[in-house]
Image (cartoon, rainbow, N blue to C red):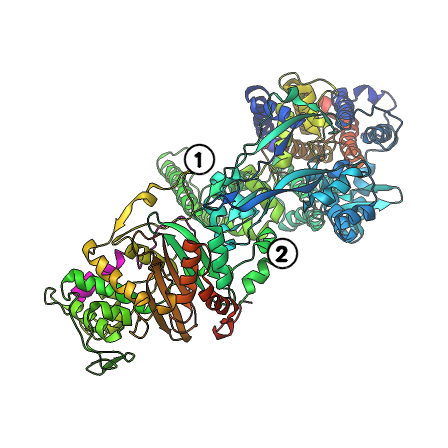
């Protein structure tokens, strides 16, 4: 039996300082970059609360308070009990936003209460993670042989907020939800689902840049070759157990692939919105329009590229100063990192993220408490998605999708929710330090 | 969950792969590729475009047809705009305050996209308005005026020939990537065909910006600036006074007049009526819809686009072919009994003595005579059948430039149509037609389509006694090159020895004594030796078209002209006076007192209501 506060030993000695230090470095480094991105020759006045950097300072300090409260003030079991209620409230907020939200840059995702406004979509990630962890860690849920209705329940928990966020036209956050598949995979979802998903994305892109007929032929050929190899192996290699329904599996993947290839044009032209289409065209080089759709990415690449190896130095970025890059303190904050701190600074940030993410995976993996493990995987996956999409977008590897860079981007909603996500995990993990001491893999 | 433990490794490996890709891309743009550093410098530098003056268009004597005047575009840098007095601003430019509000609403909406860019706010402001604005410019931070040159037209002539300029649109830029939004390009006419020479080359001035995007200094004292290179002047072959006179005569008539200098192929005048006013050219966008919807289609350049039957003028072609083929001689005489009667076909004619020889047949424009000529050509025993003979005939006709684009330096020229055996094989079936079927070709009716330009070129060929230079509208020199084909003589398939015979007949058309049946006597001007031929082209849509071609003087001709007045009636009534007045004006410089009445009558006549209008485009 674990207890909330063990009397014999102070568990706080076992706090995961690696995560906490990485977090602190990122947040402080982030604030410096917000400051740099707002820097003009007017000078810096930290007490001028019309400035983003001053406001961000308030967000940071309050985030620290929240972190402290989570670590010292809340019983970690608390989340399991409130996760359902929390989730329902958040869903209600999401739904309300569709009707009474403020429209900013084409998406209606802000709720305003008096002087404060925030994005329910950010909080929904926490609620969804908690509910998924609660549900999937309950004895009721058998993850090795899940019942169909359980899978359905899990899917619904994830899909409801996704649909609502989609209705707010906040496409970026919807994509982030796909990160949960990493957790599902860890919890036993068959690997082919991920393979199929990546294949589908690859087919979609390749069909856009080539043509559907070429891709159809190429894909059919690949499937045929793989199938033949597999078939011959199965026939002559006794070590491979014969698999039933081999033909139908390959036939099905062939048909699904072909359907996607021939549906690509339709999806691209009729399902995607105009600006999404334009951004994808820009990314794939199908159209070059550096003054229009491609302006942001082009300017952002210039800013990052001009940083060179060591960067132009703190507060010395010219691209940043002249405001060439739009949304510079929020979605495109990485431009400032790249320009002022150069390749070394960019690597520093990437390594910090990798450390945080991998550390969470590791700690989650060796935790004996399924809630902590599942929740940990959710947190790490969400951070992963944000980092890859955000940085990828600023350097022209991913279409422009407006989501913040965790811990760094300006904005209270984002900073708060990532702080909560991370520190709830740290606290959960701390709670079970005793148990995994006894296990083999410390 | 130990069973799934290994999966963490896959996830971590996948994550690392993606991070390595991100790092590799960062390495590429930050360390390897220098392009981004250069671009970053460019961002801090401001290139201000300096527009060159567009080349002028002059007439053959140096009169300015199209010149330049200075106007201003008011530019705005939305991020720099401070609060300003909207109503004062609007008062200067005669604007509606709603326009300003609407613009700024737009800027606000796209502010992230616009950034610090500068964009046009009001276009084409007169220098008067600009000067008022400039005096108060410090009240309107963020606004700025840049000088541009606009077209102005001192001579009210040749709007259809000159063409106009307009701002390039997105489609155009897609096809011509060296143009930028805000640039102008020539549309139609010389403005379009000579765009390359006229446009000049843009230059720029480089400024350094400070952190607030204010211009800090002239970058390196202008060391890297580029001055704009003004466009070249284009000298056209047009004779502005003649062009203007032609437009005056053709006022309130539908049709066209084309005048060519036979010895060079230079187009002296090209009137298409009703045409565009030069005042409209300057503000073509304002008038564009009116012009497009005008039932008389003023944008349609009839001189090169309207292919119609040439009427009796075409008899000269058939006469020449007859002589060349040896089926007639100048002394051949054919009867006319108020027309030509063969089988159940009758081609009517007017009352005149019979039979006639070659010259008199031209002089009196006898239909019957040329029916005999055409049948002699087509039923020539030398050819196995009528189809072969007609193909040969068609070849002769096309050697004059008929039925094809002449290849002028003028846009939207039409080819017209000359039939050959295939045409009738298709219509009647192979061997189901004979020379009598196509008899109307003899008098320039039926399946023939010629533009007034074709007719003028034909007239120039007659004036040159057997060859023509491709008509063109731009003169060489002053850095302007024209295609070498404009210096080449194009001979027809007719021996040059036969041309003087036809010219003799054409002389008689105009100059034979009164009462002897010359159809073009009204074109007679003492001392000018005008040679001409009338034509009256029947058409199924209304009154006959009035046609006349002539050149003068007979020896060493200076001008060849074709006039085509739609639905006006006999060639002698309208086309001949108009053409001859233009010849007289061109050669003598003024109209003799005894022809002033005729001039008056032509100028005042309004034949517009005779033209049946197709319902206007909606």
- In reply to whether residue A336 is colored magenta, the answer given is no
Label 1 resides on the chain identified as B
As drawn, is A65 to the left or to the right of B355?
Answer: right
Which residue occupies the foreground of this view, A339 or A40? A40
Whether residue A192 can be seen here: no
Q: Which region shows up in magenta?
A: B386-413
Which residue occupies the foreground of this view, B563 or A160? B563
Q: Position of residue A396 (x, y in %)?
A: 59, 32
Element type where label 1 sits in the image: loop
Q: Nearer the viewer, mark 2 or mark 1?
A: 1
Q: Residue furthest bottom?
A: B344
Which residue occupies the foreground of this view, B120 or B321? B321
As drawn, is B415 to the left or to the right of B133?
Answer: left
Whether residue A413 can be seen here: yes
Q: Is residue A204 above or below residue A381?
A: below
What residue lies at 58% left-to-right and 19% top-to-bottom?
B31
Marks counted in the figure total 2
**What residue is pinned by disc 1?**
B479
- In reply to whether residue B393 is colored magenta, the answer given is yes
Q: Position of residue A21 (x, y in %)?
A: 76, 20
As drawn, is B535 to the left or to the right of A367?
Answer: left
As drawn, is A364 to the left or to the right of B269?
Answer: right
**What residue is pinned by disc 2?**
B286
Residue A182 disc label: none
């Amino acid at each position: 039996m674990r207890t909330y506060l063990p009397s014999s030993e102070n568990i706080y000695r076992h706090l995961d300082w690696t995560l906490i230090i990485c977090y602190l470095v990122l947040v402080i480094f982030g604030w410096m970059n917000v400051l740099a991105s707002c820097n003009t020759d007017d000078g810096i006045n930290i007490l001028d609360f019309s400035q983003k950097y001053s406001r961000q300072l308030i967000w940071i300090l309050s985030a620290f308070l929240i972190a402290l409260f989570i670590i010292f003030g809340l019983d970690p079991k608390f989340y399991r009990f409130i996760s359902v209620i929390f989730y329902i409230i958040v869903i209600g907020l999401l739904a309300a936003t569709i009707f009474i939200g403020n429209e900013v840059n084409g998406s209606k995702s802000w709720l305003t209460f008096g002087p404060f406004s925030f994005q329910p979509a950010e909080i929904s990630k926490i609620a969804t993670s908690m509910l998924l962890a609660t549900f999937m860690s309950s004895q009721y849920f058998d993850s090795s042989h899940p019942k169909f209705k359980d899978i359905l329940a899990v899917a619904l928990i994830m899909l409801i907020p996704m649909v609502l966020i989609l209705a707010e036209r906040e496409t970026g956050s919807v994509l982030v939800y796909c990160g949960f598949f990493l957790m599902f995979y860890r919890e036993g979802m068959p690997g082919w689902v991920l393979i199929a998903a990546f294949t589908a994305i690859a087919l979609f892109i390749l069909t856009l840049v080539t043509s559907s007929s070429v891709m159809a032929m190429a894909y059919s050929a690949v499937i045929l070759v793989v199938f033949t190899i597999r078939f011959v192996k199965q026939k002559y290699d006794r070590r491979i157990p014969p698999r039933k329904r081999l033909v139908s599996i390959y036939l099905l993947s062939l048909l699904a692939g072909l359907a996607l290839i021939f549906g690509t044009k339709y999806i691209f032209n009729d399902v995607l919105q105009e600006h999404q289409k334009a951004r994808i065209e820009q990314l794939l080089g199908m159209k070059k329009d550096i003054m229009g759709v491609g302006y942001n990415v082009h300017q952002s690449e210039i800013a990052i590229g001009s940083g060179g190896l060591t960067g132009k130095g703190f507060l010395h970025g010219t691209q940043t100063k002249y405001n060439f890059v739009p949304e510079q303190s929020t979605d495109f904050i990485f431009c400032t990192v790249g320009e002022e701190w150069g390749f070394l600074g960019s690597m520093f940030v990437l390594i910090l993220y990798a450390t945080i993410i991998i550390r969470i995976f590791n700690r989650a993996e060796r935790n004996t408490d399924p809630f902590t493990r599942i929740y940990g995987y959710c947190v790490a996956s969400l951070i992963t998605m944000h980092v890859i999409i955000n940085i990828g977008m600023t350097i022209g590897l991913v279409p422009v999708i407006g989501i913040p860079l965790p811990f760094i981007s300006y904005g209270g909603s984002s900073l708060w929710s990532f702080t909560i996500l991370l520190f709830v995990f740290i606290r959960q993990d701390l709670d079970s330090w005793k148990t995994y001491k006894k296990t083999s893999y410390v | 969950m130990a069973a799934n433990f290994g999966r963490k490794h896959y996830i971590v490996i996948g994550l690392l792969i993606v991070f390595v890709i991100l790092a590799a891309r960062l390495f590429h743009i930050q360390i390897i590729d220098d392009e981004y550093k250069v671009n970053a410098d460019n961002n801090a530098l401001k290139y201000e475009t300096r527009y060159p003056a567009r080349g002028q268009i002059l007439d053959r004597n140096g009169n300015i047809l199209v010149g330049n005047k200075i106007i201003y575009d008011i530019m705005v840098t939305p991020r720099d705009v401070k609060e300003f007095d909207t109503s004062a601003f609007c008062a200067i430019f005669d604007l509606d305050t709603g326009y300003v509000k609407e613009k700024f609403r737009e800027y606000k909406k796209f502010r992230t996209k616009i950034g610090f860019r500068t964009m046009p706010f009001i276009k084409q402001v007169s220098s008067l308005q600009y000067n008022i604005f400039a005096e108060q410019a410090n009240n309107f931070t963020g606004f700025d005026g840049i000088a541009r040159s606009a077209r102005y037209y001192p001579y009210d002539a040749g709007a259809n020939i000159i063409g106009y300029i307009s701002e390039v649109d997105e489609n155009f830029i897609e096809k011509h990537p060296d143009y930028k939004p805000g640039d102008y390009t020539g549309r139609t006419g010389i403005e379009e065909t000579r765009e390359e020479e006229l446009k000049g080359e843009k230059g720029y001035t480089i400024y350094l910006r400070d952190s607030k995007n204010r211009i800090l200094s002239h970058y390196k004292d202008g060391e890297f600036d580029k001055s704009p290179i003004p466009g070249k002047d284009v000298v056209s072959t047009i004779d502005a006074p003649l062009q203007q006179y032609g437009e005056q005569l053709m006022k309130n008539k539908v049709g066209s007049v084309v005048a060519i200098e036979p010895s060079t192929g230079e187009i002296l005048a090209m009137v298409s009526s009703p045409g565009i006013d030069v005042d409209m050219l300057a503000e073509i966008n304002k008038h564009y819809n009116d012009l497009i919807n005008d039932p008389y289609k003023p944008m349609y350049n009839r001189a090169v686009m309207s292919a119609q039957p040439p009427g009796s003028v075409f008899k000269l072609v058939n006469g020449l072919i007859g002589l060349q083929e040896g089926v007639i001689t100048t002394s051949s005489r054919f009867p006319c009994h108020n027309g030509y009667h063969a089988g159940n076909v009758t081609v009517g004619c007017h009352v005149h003595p019979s039979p006639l020889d070659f010259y008199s047949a031209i002089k009196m424009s006898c239909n019957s005579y040329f029916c005999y000529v055409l049948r002699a050509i087509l039923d020539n025993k030398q050819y196995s059948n009528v189809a072969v003979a007609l193909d040969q005939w068609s070849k002769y006709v096309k050697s004059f430039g008929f039925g094809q684009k002449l290849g002028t330096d003028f846009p939207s020229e039409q080819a017209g149509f000359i039939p050959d055996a295939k045409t009738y094989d298709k219509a009647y079936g192979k061997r189901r037609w004979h020379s009598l079927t196509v008899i109307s070709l003899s008098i320039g009716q039926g399946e023939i389509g010629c533009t007034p330009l074709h007719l003028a070129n034909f007239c120039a060929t007659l004036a040159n006694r057997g060859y023509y230079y491709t008509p063109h509208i731009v003169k060489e020199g002053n850095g302007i090159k024209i295609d070498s084909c404009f210096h080449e003589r194009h001979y027809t398939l007719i021996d040059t020895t036969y041309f003087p015979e036809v010219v003799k007949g054409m002389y008689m058309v105009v100059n034979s004594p009164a009462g002897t049946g010359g159809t073009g006597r009204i074109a007679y001007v003492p001392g000018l030796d005008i040679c001409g031929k009338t034509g009256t082209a029947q058409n199924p849509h209304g009154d006959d078209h009035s046609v006349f071609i002539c050149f003068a003087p007979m020896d060493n001709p200076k001008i060849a002209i074709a006039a085509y007045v739609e639905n006006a009636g006999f060639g002698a009534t309208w086309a001949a006076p108009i053409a001859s007045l233009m010849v007289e004006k061109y050669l003598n410089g003024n109209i003799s007192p005894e022809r002033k009445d005729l001039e008056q009558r032509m100028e005042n006549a309004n034949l517009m209501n005779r033209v049946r209008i197709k319902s206007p485009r909606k």
